[in-house]
Amino acid sequence: MENAASRLAEVETNIARICKPARREPQDITLIAVSKTHPAEKIEQLLEAGHRVFGENRVQEAQEKWPALLERFPDAELHLIGQLQSNKADDAVAMFDYIHALDRPSLLKALAKAMDKAGKRVPCFVQVNIGDEDQKGGCAIAELPDFLAKVRDADIPIAGLMCLPPADIEPAPFFAFLAKLAQDNGVEGLSMGMSGDYETAVQLGATHVRVGTALFGARG
């Protein structure tokens, strides 16, 4: 418990420290504790330390861990931060409060159908393939304005843009580029930054940072 609380305090302190020179308010940044692959006991420690926003990569894993946790902590907020298969759209809409990887027309269609059926709208971040990498998901930069128009037409709330910069390259230019794309397209939220680079992301306008290792420690 103490370990989880101290890690949480350290990350929150770092965010507040970066906000000062960036002339931002710490409360404007949502810290998503990435709990993928971590057992319910470790998640519970962070919940007991007062944290409420968590991110999972896979629908099935969330379904296994979270129902019991949500019974005890009904105010917890769940973000799906991993790639989503269209055939899991119904389950994702039922389970999550936010979806971070809306990146292609087939998924857009599946999510719109699932939300209509469930009678609820789940805000989505549109993932942008910011480094133009073949192996990564994400909407191509050139197709972003058209895709955002399609998302709006489907009446899906746009929470913002999301990106995963190329590994082993300075992330700052990619974060700055995502912020510019958001501005150019009238989008406010920016889901960017993980344990190794969340401070840079906050400096460059992130509204949501996805932090796992710095909060939970290394995965077993």
Image (spheres, rainbow, N blue to C red):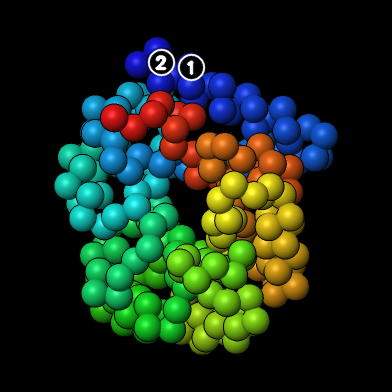
Amino acid type for the residue under numbered disc 1: Ser
**Residue highlighted by disc 1:** 6
Q: Is residue 96 left or right of residue 29?
A: left
Q: What crowding class fits label 1: few (fewer than 14 Cα within 10 Å), some (14-19), or many (20 or more)?
A: some
Looking at this view, is 70 or 162 the one in front?
A: 162
Q: What is the number of callouts on the image?
A: 2
Q: Nearer the viewer, residue 144 or 160?
A: 144
User: Which quarter of the picture shows residue 196?
Assistant: top right
Q: Which of the pair 196/84 is nearer the observer?
A: 196
Q: Residue at x 26, y 57 (%)?
A: 59
Residue found at the far top of this picture: 2
Asked if residue 12 lies left or right of residue 8, the reply is right
Considering the image in quadrants, where does the N terminus appear?
top left
The label shown at residue 186 is: none
In the rendering, at what x and y percent does residue 210 appear? 50, 45
Q: Residue at x 67, y 62 (%)?
A: 178
Q: State the image quarter where residue 82 is shown.
A: bottom left
Instruction: Give the residue type that dot 2 points to.
Output: Asn
Question: Residue tagged by mark 2?
Answer: 3
- The local secondary structure at tag 1 comes to helix
Residue 24 left/right relative to 161 = right
Q: Are marks 1 and 2 in contact (CB under 8 Å)?
A: yes
Residue appearing at x 48%, y 16% in the figure: 6
Closer to us: 88 or 177:
177
